[in-house]
Amino acid sequence: MPETIIPIGPYHPALKEPEFFQLIVEGEKIVDVKMRMGYIHRGIEFLASKKTIHQIPVLVERICGICSHCHPTCFCQAVEDAGDIEVPDRARYIRTIIAELERIHSHLLWAGVAAHLIGYDTLFMYFWRYREPVCNLFELLTGNRQNYAMECVGGVRRDIDFKMSKDKILKVLSEIKPAILRLANSIAEDPVVKARMVGIGVLSQHDARKYCVVGPTARGSGLKIDVRICEPYDAYKEVGVDMKVFTEGDAMARTLVRIHEVLESMEIIGRAIDAIPNGPIQVELKEPPKGEGVGKVEAPRGEDIHYVALNGTVIPERLKVRAPSYVNLPSLTPQLIGHDIADAPIIIGAVDPCMSCTDRMVSIVDRKRNDKVILSLEELAQFGRKNKNPLKVRR
Amino acid sequence: MGLTRFSQDAGNSDDVLSVAVEQVKDPESVVVKIKEHLGEHFEQHYVKRKNRVYVTVRKEAVRKCAKFIFESLGARLSTVTCVDKNFRFELIYHFTFDNTGLVLNIKCLIPKYEPKVESVSEIIFGANWIEREIKDLFGVEFVGHPNPERLILSDDWPENEYPLRRRLIE
């Protein structure tokens, strides 16, 4: 039977990252999905087997430009697990504050991109406007807007003077909080956003478990998965985290999970700054750690896990990196099947895929006509905006 | 502020089942249960610290073991690591228990001259890509994999060449 494949990628102007999705369609409906990855495979794991444990945090920081704090933290945790290294309290708090600020900027970036994918560019610009002060905060605290270079095995590299920066941080957060609440309300109540997101890309709890999804994708499908709660690392035990879980499993549920997380992150930062103790920021390593260790961190996209095998030298025998998007992306198959082509961009967008993290493709085929229609994701997004009746609310 | 209006749509975390089955709390009891289930295929275990348990099983029992842990104990497969150990490959299946944070690492050793192991992708869909990646990078064959195509390596990469496989040291 002839089929039509609509390829998205590997190079397309909308998501800015190389991935290749093949959407197999019958008319408007997607009947199957094929994905292909590997376009930005950079051999990080191989490189890591040539570098010392002091150089690797800098290397793994460059896996992803958005969650550039999670990977080094995760690696350091794995080494600290292998060598039973205790991290000083102040370093744990600094890691927590940077990680939560990163979650705010990552989720705001995602919310902007998602709004753009459903054709709501005003919302896109608002979200990114309020992300900007957060990036400026990073510059103030770490010297860099991205790739903060704060981590080292046994603590953090630089201290932050919170006497100086506390007022500035709280001022920025108190300024963007009412704005984000306003935008959150507009997302939750706007009929156009509801028409595009409610009931779209549904991932059932059963499928979520079978595909082992993590992060907001899992929490949007009713699975209580949050590393910060199930195994509190850093200072999360002291400052506490409130987890919101939605059972709908659609794009809207994931959006609401993320917005709640942004608000919760602001609370966490406030509590962490109030409770930060004085003291050393790192411990000296007497000798290179030996053995094997597993580090787990709740990145903005979900659970990040690193496994490291150390043989008593400073160069690890093996480093395995598993970023959250790697397990979230295969779950797109049950989400996309049965939906219109016009919904594909937002469904793919709603799991917040990070191809640099995953590094691994979707194309669209019409089974009756057997002609291969090739659309870029930008064209597809435009097609989605033109052909979707926003007043047709599904639920 | 508008929080009250927004919160009306908020989910409630109490009435949601975390997983389909009840999870086990104590690491030692997890090991005992696996030992009972696997019998002679269970080789050894050690507890690194409270939440890090390493269990070595025979390669014949990997599928049985993964099915038991995923379906009966309610754990989630985080990832699979392959380590090149000169004459052998070591596969480590990292299972996470989401209520306690326990990471259960199931290890099995497979010989390099015949790198074959049973696939768990039919039971755990999430293992599909992970196994394809290991096949690409190490050349380990997963018997019974539903879609054993290339994932990471490009289509023009030569056959029988595996980037992360090391040369044998005699």
Image (spheres, coloured by chain):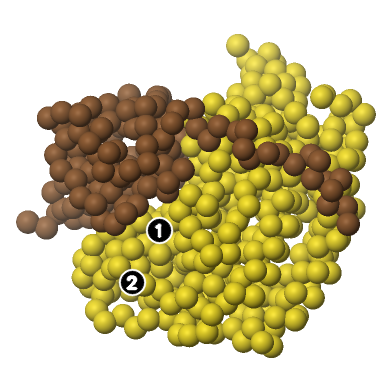
Q: Is residue A384 left or right of residue A95?
A: right
Q: Residues within 10 Å of mark 1 (few under 14, many from 20)?
A: many
The total of numbered circles placed on residues is 2
Q: Is residue A266 left or right of residue A284?
A: right
On the image, the x and y values in percent for residue A33 come to 59, 28
Q: Circle 1 — which element?
A: strand
Q: Residue at x 90, y 40 (%)?
A: A190
Quadrant of the drawing holding the C terminus of chain A: top right
On the image, the x and y values in percent for residue A120 come to 87, 46
Does any portion of residue A29 appear in the rendered image?
yes
Residue at the spot of label 2: A85
Q: Residue at x 69, y 57 (%)?
A: A264
Does any portion of residue A62 appear in the rendered image?
no
Residue at the spot of label 1: A295
Chain that bears disc 2: A
Closer to the camera in the image, A323 or A90 = A90
Distance from Cα at disc 1 to Cα at disc 2:
13 Å
Q: Residue furthest top?
A: A1
Residue B20, relative to residue B170: is it above or below?
above
- Residue A293: image quadrant is bottom left
Closer to the camera in the image, B17 or B61 = B17
Q: Circle 2 — which element?
A: loop
Q: Amino acid at mark 1?
A: Gly
Q: Which chain is yellow?
A: A
Q: Amino acid at mark 2?
A: Ile
On the image, the x and y values in percent for residue A226 come to 54, 48
Chain that bears disc 1: A
Q: Which chain is brown?
A: B
